[in-house]
Image: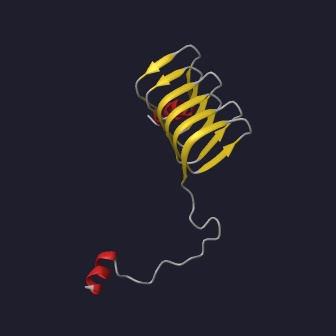
Amino acid sequence: MFSEKPKKAKSILESVNQQNTIARGTTITGDIISDGDFRIEGTVQGNVKTPGKVVLGKTGVINGTLHGANADIEGKFSGKLILTEMLSLKSSAFVEGEVEVGKFAVEPGATFNATCVMRGSQNEFGNNSKPSQNNDTPAKKEQLVK
């Protein structure tokens, strides 16, 4: 009875830690949702969503939306890229579209034709400004002026 639970827990952890691979020469059209990491050497026409890491290899192509934590891009990405943590563009990377990341690293030679928003700590660069002590909302201020 006690030996069954650890086996189930172990198999769940193993499946989450395994990497999904889309091989070169493979094209997938549609949405992909997974709890595991991805390595893409083929083509994805659609959306990829994972809480883990996506590695887009040199022959890999994504046309769509990518939601994840981290991504290393060596291939071609076109669309909307939303990462909670780190985006790393290798020298062979080509990225176009919209990008929203926590941190961003680019090697020389990478092509980046995108709008980019970095979401990070507001106090990271010594922003010590204190919030306004005025509790009046804009609507309240407008009423006071009238």
| Of residues 134 and 114, the one drawn nearer to the viewer in this rendering | 114
Q: Residue at the spot x=59%, y=16% of the render?
A: 24
Quarter of the image for the C terminus: give it.
bottom left
Between 63 and 30, the one nearer to me in the picture: 63
Q: Is residue 28 left or right of residue 25?
A: left
Q: Looking at the rendering, which quadrant does residue 23 occupy?
A: top right
Quarter of image, res 55: top right
The location of residue 44, given as percent across then percent down, is 49, 24
Residue at x-position 60% and y-position 75%: 128
The residue closer to the viewer here, 99 or 130, is 99
Decide if residue 106 is on the left or right side of residue 11. right
Pinpoint residue 106: horizontal percent, then vertical percent: 69, 42
Establish if 3 lies above or below 116. above
Give the quarter of the image for residue 121: bottom right
x and y, in percent, of residue 111 in the image: 65, 36
Residue 46 in sight here: yes
Front residue of 64 and 8? 64
- The quarter in which the N terminus is drawn is top left
Q: Residue at x 56, y 65 (%)?
A: 122
Q: Is residue 42 above or below residue 2?
A: above
Colour pattern: secondary structure
- Quick one: which residue is furthest to the front in this view? 146
* Residue 51 in picture, x, y percent from top left: 50, 40
Q: Is residue 142 above or below residue 78?
A: below
Q: Residue furthest top?
A: 25
